[in-house]
Amino acid sequence: QKEVEQNSGPLSVPEGAIASLNCTYSDRGSQSFFWYRQYSGKSPELIMFIYSNGDKEDGRFTAQLNKASQYVSLLIRDSQPSDSATYLCAVRRDSSYKLIFGSGTRLLVRP
Amino acid sequence: DAEITQSPRHKITETGRQVTLACHQTWNHNNMFWYRQDLGHGLRLIHYSYGVQDTNKGEVSDGYSVSRSNTEDLPLTLESAASSQTSVYFCASSSGAQETQYFGPGTRLLVL
């Protein structure tokens, strides 16, 4: 079992819809959770992070964390074709500064 | 503006050669990381450093080494390049207080 799992996709949604990206993790001691976006041929860029159970909103993006069920999700409202990218979930597992990354979910937003 | 750069951006080398990939950051971050990214595997940690003279092995460190002689640079050396090391390599950095890692533009390495 991978430590951080994501469905590879592609997840295809129409423009204007809500895209829901999910990530599960295996270590219950995981402390911090990150979502990165990576366009093809580019480097990952941070979208947002979340530490506490519940929702955290930033513009069109909402991160949701449920530590009891060991999952974290990213909702993208009013999806745009420019949101088409691979979304990487990352988890800080312990007191170190290392992050464990999932393999990413490819999102396609259809015009 | 502070940034993180990698060089070269593209590299072709032959099996058995020593290769060094450079990573330079101007954020004055203590923490620096090297990852490789391959299809189906996501980002895998090769080596990391929490400060000058500190280096640590990640999950896929065999065949790689790093050294940290100053805050700004963490060069990655492939001692004897192998075809299995063909990949995209990303350098990242973070401050001690913040966990967020910021990535360089990447180096595409092809080992023939």
Image (tube, rainbow, N blue to C red):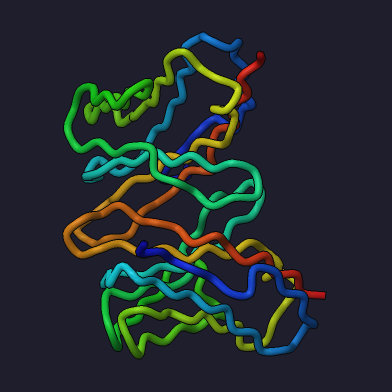
In the rendered image, residue A51, in percent from the top left (x then y), is placed at: 20, 38
Q: Point out residue B58 in the picture as x, y percentages from the top left corner.
A: 42, 69
Q: Is residue A49 above or below residue B72?
A: above
Rendered-image quadrant of the C terminus of chain B? bottom right
Q: Quadrant of residue B25?
A: bottom left
In the depicted structure, whether residue B3 falls above or below residue B80: above
Q: What residue occupies the far right of the structure in this picture?
A: B112
The residue lying furthest to the front in this view is B1
Q: Please state, as top left, top right, bottom left or bottom right, where the N terminus of chain B lies in the image.
A: bottom left
Residue at 56 percent of width and 36 percent of height: A86
Q: Position of residue A67 (x, y in %)?
A: 23, 30
Q: Is residue B52 left or right of residue B22?
A: left
- Locate residue A8, reporting x and y percent: 59, 33
Residue under the point 44% across and 75% down: B24
Task: Identify the image quadrant of residue B3.
Answer: bottom left
Q: Is residue B23 above or below residue A25?
A: below
Q: Nearer the viewer, residue B63 or A78?
A: A78
